[in-house]
Image (cartoon, grey):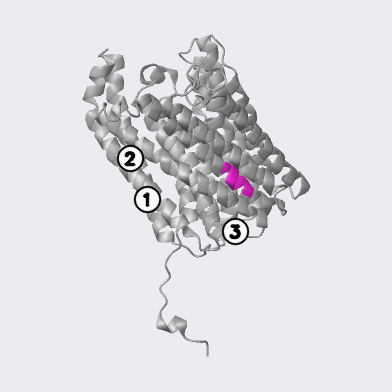
Amino acid sequence: MKYHTQKIALVYFVVAMALFAVQVSVGLIMGWVYVAPNFLSEILPFNVLRPLHTNSLIVWLLLGFFGAAYYLIPEESEREIHSSKLAYLQLGILVLGTLGVVLTYTFNLFEGNFLLGKEGREFLEQPKWVKLGIVVAALIFLYNVTMTVLAGKKTAITNILLLGLWGLALLFLFAFYNPGNLALDKQYWWFVVHLWVEGVWELIMAAILAFLMLKLTGVDREVVEKWLYVIVATALFSGILGTGHHYYWIGTPGYWQWIGSIFSSLEIVPFFAMMSFAFIMVWKGRRDHPNKAALLWSLGCAVLAFFGAGVWGFLHTLHGVNFYSHGTQITAAHGHLAFYGAYVCVNLAIITYAMPNLLGRDPYNQVLNMASFWLMSAGMVFMTVTLTFAGALQTHLQRVNGEAYMDVQDQLWIFYAMRFGAGAAVVLGALLFIYSVMVPRREIITPRQTMPAE
């Protein structure tokens, strides 16, 4: 660790890992509810479990991004973070908001209250006071990292990272706009949800991946930066108008069917470029870096993001297909692998790379870490394939044959049972990952090692 303020990242990563454990655990409970619908229905009904699962996912990924920024910006800018106190204040605000959200969702507090009660918008259910806290935390963060970069060395990695982080904060402001017209509401709702995960988050992901490739492979910075600009250009070109694939059936004009189909089909390009970039950097690399686990997570991120966000996204993005498949388990299959491949893996990659340095524990238990990669990734791929088959069957029975929704759900139980088994593997892998990065490896000292040097 070269800079003292990189230690800020450690606290962010620890909180992120705690929320990661909560997220996958709640997801496993939800998986069992699909098999046994009345499970915990009186204590934690599904309408409480789902926002806990999705919100904890979003918050821990954001904390991971913030931690990654606090770790890599000092190295790229060659100076300390502008203010450690502001960084910890930002984290305190986010943790307070997270606790407020959990209590509000779980106990249904302040129902109907404009400021304190939850909203009925998927992913943006947070009460107004929490949203305001998020904006304050984002402003603190942007001021802190921007001042650091402006005062230090500028690189393509910090430029793209800041572009993504500024876009993330500004687009969240649409979360406050909640018009009474449902079609208009959904149109602006996607300005947050889509333009986050298929827009500015991709820039953040590309910047973090570029930093990792630079450190792990030893490839020249100029080569990394050229690839980075190509990836960012294709991501923005396809992602912005690709928002149209969410506009097919919400009451917007019909021309969105063609705009959405064309541009969202191109969204596979930046993910293919990212996968090619990662493997070419490793192939050209001159450095045999000891942190093999971080390299595994980086390559796994590129591959699984290509299949989850790219291939599985393309499977049902054309409006002729989407007419039948939208809102089925095919959507769930795409969403799970896309989020895991693109954003979970890149966060776990930077955590795997940074934690040994932050904790002064190098080398650390890479075998357990790599085992967690294969266990989590295999579980997620199996879950995706299972949900894809479930969605294809659901589409035919429900949307083509016209069978009732609940009758179709009864026929999908075998897929839900398999999905639960895959979820159990993901949870075990997540716990193994957390253990591998947080708990030091026990060194075995032999008598020869204890002998004084001659």
Q: Give the range drawn in magenta.
A: 65-70
Density class for disc 3 (Cα within 10 Å; few <14, some 14-19, many ≥20) is some
Helix, strand or loop at disc 1? helix
Q: Residue 218 carries which label?
A: 3
Q: Which of 201 and 48 is in front in this view?
A: 48
Sequence-first disc among 3 and 2: 3
Mark drawn on residue 374:
1
Q: Mark 3 or mark 1: which comes first in sequence?
A: 3
Q: Can residue 134 be seen in this view?
A: yes
Q: Which of marks 3 and 2 is in front?
A: 2
Q: For the residues marked 2 and 1, what is the alpha-carbon distance in whole angstroms? A: 14 Å
Q: Mark number for residue 25?
A: none
Mark 3: amino acid? Gly
Badge 2, how many Cα within 10 Å: few under 14, some, many 20+? many
The quarter of the picture where residue 107 lies is top left
Task: Please name the amino acid that badge 1 sits on.
Answer: Trp
Where is residue 369 shown, x and y percent of the image? 42, 55
Which residue position is annotated with label 2? 423
Q: In which quarter of the image is residue 390?
A: top left
x, y percentage for residue 373?
Answer: 40, 50
Amino acid bearing label 2: Gly
Outermost bottom residue = 454
Q: Is mark 2 on a helix, strand or loop?
A: helix
Q: Nearer the viewer, mark 3 or mark 1?
A: 1
User: What is the distance, in whole Å, between disc 3 and disc 2 at their CAs?
Assistant: 36 Å
